[in-house]
Image: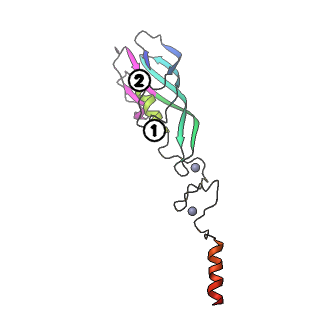
Amino acid sequence: MKIPILHLEEGNHHLEDLIKKGSLHFYRDEVYYNDIRIRVDLNKFDKNISCRAEISTRIHLSCDRCLAEFDRDFRENFEILFYVGQKELAIDEDSVVLISPELKEIDLTPYIQETLLLSVPMKFVCRTDCKGICAGCGVDLNQETCRCNEKPYDSRWEKLKDFKKSK
Ligand SMILES: [Zn+2]
Ligand SMILES: [Zn+2]
């Protein structure tokens, strides 16, 4: 998402954009399968641009324990100050990007991508008490009870036991 800033008037601006699905690439593309909506509030002052962006989309996740698949709404914000000034700033440097006063446009795409990557958990559990899948019998323990300790019951063996006893 590129925003022309060189001739932008000083003051507040609101912009919206839709990043079409598939136009950004991620390590886990299957997670970010939907369009990504971006709302940006920016303020230009003395050629500096302070920018607050909200990202919203729907992501696709699978539970790390039971493998169930889900879609979830995703919403996250980031703030960046594109700063031309030379003065020392008393704010978090991570959110400050130094720019030249002649810079024509700012590109928010890398920040959008980074926010998505950092805010979506690598490991995800469908619910905190998800019991997962039994490594022994393979049942989904949220749906069924473990069968590992079930003794196979077969009447023929029971009869054989009786036969041995009676001998
Ligand atoms: Zn689960
Ligand atoms: Zn089991």
Is residue 37 at all visible to an observer of this figure? yes
Secondary structure of the residue carrying tag 2 is strand
Instruction: Look at the picture and state if 52 lies above or below 134.
Output: above
Is residue 90 at all visible to an observer of this figure? no
Q: Is residue 87 magenta?
A: yes
Q: Is residue 156 magenta?
A: no
Q: Which residues are magenta?
A: 80-106
Question: CB atoms at circles 1 and 2 under 8 Å apart?
Answer: no
Q: CA distance from mark 1 to mark 2?
A: 21 Å
Left or right of 109 in this view: 11: right
Instruction: Look at the picture and state if 92 lies above or below 63.
Output: above
In the rendered image, residue 138, in percent from the top left (x then y), is placed at: 55, 57
Disc sitting over residue 82 in the figure: 2
Label 2 amino acid? Phe
Q: Earlier in the sequence, mark 1 or mark 2?
A: 2
Disc sitting over residue 118 in the figure: 1
Give the colour scheme shown. rainbow
